[in-house]
Amino acid sequence: MSAIGDQAYLRDVAAEKLPAPAERTGVIGWLRENLLSSPTNIVLTLACIVVIAWVVPPLVRFFLVDAVWSGADRDACLASPLQTQPGACWAFMRIWFSYFVYGFYPLAERWRVDVFFVALAFGIVWLAWLSAPRRDLGGLYFFVVLPILSFVLLHGAPLIGLPVVPTSLWGGILVTVVVATIGMVFSLPLGILLALGRNSEMPVTKAAAVGFIEFVRGVPLITVLFMASVMLPLFVPERFAPDKLVRALIGVALFASAYMAEVVRGGLAAVPRGQYEAARVLGLSYWRMMGLVILPQALRVTLPNIVNTFIGLFKDTTLVFVVGIFDFMRTVEAARADPKWTTPNTTVTAYVFAALFYFVCCYGMSRYARSVEARLTRAGRR
Amino acid sequence: MLQRTLSTRRRLGGVVLQIAIVAAIGGLGYGAAYNAGLNLSRAHIASGFGFWNNTAGFDISQTLIAYSASTSSFGRAFWVGLLNTLLVGAVGIVFATILGFVVGIARLSNNWLVARLAGGYVELVRNVPLLLQLLFWYNAVLKSLPLLHGSMALPGGAILNNRGLFLPRPVFAANFSAVVVVLVGGIICAIGLTVWSRWRHQRTGANVHIFWPSLALIVGLPLIAYAAAGFPLHFNVPQMGRFNVSGGLEILPEFVALALALSVYTAAFIAEVVRAGVLAVSHGQTEAAQALGLRSGQTLRLVVLPQAMRVIVPPLTSQYLNLIKNSSLAVVIGYPDLVQVFAGSVLNITGQAVEVIALTMAVYLAISLFTSLTMNLYIRTVAIPER
């Protein structure tokens, strides 16, 4: 009995920690876990590798290695003894590049477009950077100052010495950006009004908002654009018939506002009822309650969705093509048909270039939306 | 007292606002109608649907119903266009659903490479405008297919060249209807078998394997009937001629491009819908199913997907609607859909913009409203009863 104290069945010193088995950590562990965890997985992995090996090298060869980067006309991109299998014809894109950006905007006036791009970029950064100083001023700048400034810059004002450039000369990325921005600037306020109307208790207001939203969301954008470009001139006295670009802008803005309204409505629904009640108790009127308490919260919550709607709007701007406006897509289509550059690869190069432009813009915006969303989730968890 | 004055004031404001809205809408409508009347009469354009029965006089490259430029009316052209829209919509929906579900589930695969490839597909396709993709498929892919003389022969006797896709056209003999009758009978019997086995399973817990009997009923019986009827189906295989492909079923390159672009584009959005739906099913469900010994395929099919469908179906329907609305892009490549035929050709010939555009919009609106009504009914049936 006395020996119990000597017999140590229980360790009083913790066993030394062993490292995890080598096949479960590091690169090997990762490979086993993610690529080779079961026979099916091994087959899938092999199939993917085969597909990648089959697709990627030819693409790299076509677009980078064998691509033609400079040249004066199509001879550079045609097969020659020097280069039996020429790839993408980037030389063509380089020659046409300024057309893609400015369209037929007069050469001497193109600095105005550049200034517009810079002013726009400034406004976007101010609004998109969530901890920028005085974002309320940023909103004022983006939604009030910028539209006026852009009109004066792009359209011209003879009074201050800027000659008028008719919209028929605008083109390319300039028009795409103008259509998208105007769509944004007008659809957000309109969408907010429509969403408030839809949530209203007044039957007429509600019916008007619901009718408009459901009508616009039920028809394709093309028909709205057709309506704006064919019917609108009929509905106004002949001398007020708006310019072709303005008609398309009206169509795009109305179309986008219906979608924006639904996004804003989602945001309004996310604001707790107590906020409305508290604002009412403080004696705020309807508009002050909305403007000071509800909307700031609702718009913040729904910012990722607003950005996503804007991505859709940005992609949809390509449809103004159909009513004969020279947006970026249309300039690419026009350049593609240039007989000086007809080669078997011109079309593919032109489309891949255009796709790259849209992809970079849209993917950038969607990354931004996702980062805002992550930030909101973190804030909500606290 | 204060309360009452406040709410009275508010109600008064509401009434004034509503009257103002009615007045604005009415005024705008009246002004538009007045100007339209003035402008139309100045341009000597008739109004009303009087043109409906006039001879159309233009050709349409793809007609599902009999149509000829010299005798058919504008009204007939409208139906041709509408059917073409519905055809490309239906084909697009089928392929987009299949591709979308495959990609959506692949994105959730525990195989890193598969998930990444599926994710790359979604990101690439979603961030490039549909119009650009459509032009790419049409101008860069289909137009650069070989000319007639270099036509590609596909397995099964199909021919592909830059004039389109030529498939073997099935030709049904008179007694083929017997096979169809047997097939329908087989399907009804299989459904009956399923209902019976469910009932038995609920009663006794015993599982009856109905896969092979059902297969025999749906495939085997019609095959026997087909043989018994003396093989009443043969195919008119397209033949290469010197200047043309003769016979077979011609599918326009415009149709192929549009269906392809719509399927590929919408599939990316459907994949996201599917992914969100599957993620919405709590992980405990998967774990419970695996603890019960279900294999991963069974877990997905029997436990996860049925629950995910509740979340998936409403946004899936709106993707279908988007696809049908997006099919109006046909006008860009000249596929004769409703917009191209009616809001394009008919509008240009008659000049009656108001009627034509209004009718075109009404068609899309009707499709949307019908679908969302059906959807609301569905949501009501599958909603989990609140306890």
Image (cartoon, coloured by chain):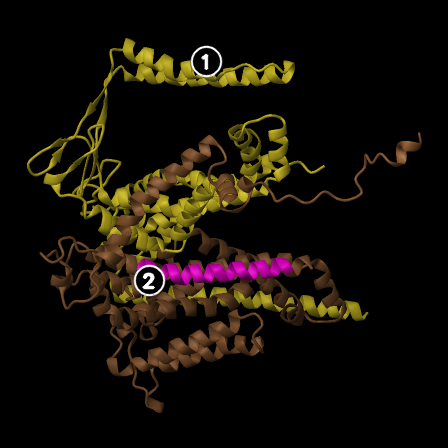
Chain B representation colour: yellow
Which residue range is magenta in the image? A354-378
Q: Is residue A374 magenta?
A: yes
Direction from residue A201 to residue B337 in the image, left or right: left
Would you place residue A138 above or below residue A264 in this image? Answer: below
Residue type indicated by callout 2: Val
Tag 1: residue type? Pro
What residue is rendered at 25% in x and 71% in y? A99
Task: State the image coordinates of residue B30 (x, y, percent, origin top left).
Answer: 43, 65
What residue did someone put label 2 on?
A320
Residue A35 to residue A239: above or below = above
Q: Quadrant of the C terminus of chain B?
A: top right
Residue A356 lies, in percent from the top left, at: 34, 60
Is B36 covered by the magenta stretch? no
- Which chain wears brown? A
Residue drawn at point x = 27 percent, y = 43 percent: B255
Q: Chain of mark 2?
A: A
Residue B213 is labelled as 1
Tell me the CA gap for discs 2 and 1. 56 Å
Q: Nearer the viewer, residue A171 or A126?
A: A126
Specify few, some or many for label 2: CA neighbours under 10 Å numbering under 14, 14-19, or 20 or more: many
Q: Main secondary structure of the magenta part?
A: helix
Mark 2 element type: helix
x, y percent for residue A56: 31, 48
Between circles 2 and 1, the one closer to the viewer is 1
* Viewer-closest of B33 and A228: A228
Q: How many marks?
A: 2
Indicate which disc residue A94 carries.
none
Q: Secondary structure at mark 1?
A: helix
Q: Quadrant of residue A343?
A: bottom left
